[in-house]
Image (cartoon, grey):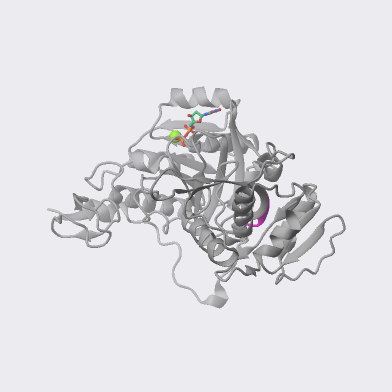
Amino acid sequence: MAKVKSKYVCQSCGYETAGYLGKCPECGAWSSFIEEVSDSATLKLTQDLPDKNPPQKLADIKINSEIRTRTNITEFDRVLGGGIVQGSLVLIAGDPGIGKSTILLQTSGALCNQGKKVLYISAEESAGQIKLRAERLGIKSDNLYIYSQTNFELIKKHIVEMRPDLVIVDSIQAVYTTTIQSSAGSVSQIRECCNFLMGIAKNNDISIIVIGHVTKEGNIAGPKVLEHMVDTVIQFEGDKYKSYRILRSIKNRFGNTSEVGIFEMGAKGLIEIINPSQAFLKEYNQTQTPGSTIIVTNEGTRPMLVEIQALVGVTPYPAPRRIANGVDLSRVLQILAVLEKRIGLNLSKQDVYVNVVGGIDVNEPAGDLGIALAIITCVRDVVFDSQTAIVGEIGLSGEIRGVSHIEKRITEAQKLGFKRIIIPDSNNIEEKFADIEIIKVKRIIEAITRAVK
Ligand code: TYD
Ligand code: MG
């Protein structure tokens, strides 16, 4: 009889032990261990993948140029690094309800229109529900197959028999393999199913896109285990209650990471936002109020103009509040400390709120100067020039430090019709810019005198 092995696996980090533990020594989670039993005989049988790639000399290896299929959804192609690579396994992760099923159904539709065969495996919704969504999105195609199934062995059988060009698995948390006796969604199930999918993708040259839900803590559930197994990890971000959605590649074996694609959720699915700066500045008030600036932030390889707003007011609380929306709170606290020390702005009795308009996150220090100026103009009740954009990192001694991709940022500001841009003095510019005045500053105080009326 085959030997039956049992182990305990932490459901939040994947740590394994032979016996039950109350607290995980790896990630510190409590009561996170679940017993998992695997039957070694069945495991061996199912893992018997054909050995297609024996070791070979470096010189003998032939390079097949990657075969990419463009989805023709430009923003999605950009994030993928130019289309879906044949035989790759892609993970799309995001909160429930953010639009993962929608974008992948749209992608399926777009590929089917190019004559590709797509198999959409829905482990969460019935075929009827998918059909309803497809109708809403205006997708009709004879090349699109919907398969509502959670059993991985059946799924595998149909993929191998049908040999589609693209397979969508919606979602990895809902499928289960019978080789492991834990419930669907557990770390081992996810890891095992993902492993099998990787094998199918590589051995049959089928591209597979897997959907993964994100846990409360923001980890890709079945936590980070999935991330290093797949070729590409794409995060789907945005607020469920706002219409902008951002696709961000956080790992890509076939392209640039931190590339972003921007969409808006509409009544007929996700619509691409080709010109994000324009969209984000739509509500920008040219007759400005104090406390608002425009910065040029860089997302992946693309510069984007976004508005930063600050509100400063006397606090009714014993300790003043500092709230940051769309920027890192510790970054804001650091900027406040610098403003206090270096330009004597006393904010110890003031609440400070900082907000990035449009629901996107500004995660780079190049936004510092814009945040600082938004706060300063709000405190002093003056208006920042509405025709000026601003970039620069603030150092602890109040100096303005250089930022990356400065020329791209200037070009973007110029394209959007800005007359001036304030940049760090240490950034060298080789290109010539005719329609935009470039103001170089070394200290915060210079930026204030140059852009505040
Ligand atoms: P869905 O793709 O089901 O999210 P996920 O698969 O990530 O859980 O989309 C969820 C939301 O999108 C849902 O609240 C309805 C909304 N939606 C639209 O606003 N317009 C549409 O055309 C579609 C299909 C969905
Ligand atoms: Mg879904």
Q: Looking at the image, which is closer to me, 9 or 176?
A: 9
x, y percent for residue 291: 63, 46
x, y percent for residue 443: 66, 67
Q: Looking at the image, which is closer to me, 254 or 383?
A: 383
Give the left or right position of residue 230, taking residue 335 as reference: left
Give the left or right position of residue 141, taking residue 382 as reference: left
Q: Looking at the image, which is closer to me, 296 or 175?
A: 296
Predominant SS of the magenta segment: strand
Q: Is residue 404 visible?
A: no
Q: Quadrant of ligand 2?
A: top left
x, y percent for residue 290: 66, 45
Give the left or right position of residue 25, taking residue 123 as reference: left
Q: Is residue 149 magenta?
A: no
Magenta residues (range)? 299-304
Q: Looking at the image, which is closer to me, 254 or 257?
A: 257
Q: Residue at x 62, y 54 (%)?
A: 376
Q: Is residue 108 above or below residue 48?
A: above
Q: Is residue 26 above or below residue 325?
A: below
x, y percent for residue 396: 54, 69
Q: Is residue 347 visible?
A: yes
Q: Residue at x 49, y 54 (%)?
A: 328
Q: Is residue 241 above or below residue 410?
A: above
Total residue callouts? 0
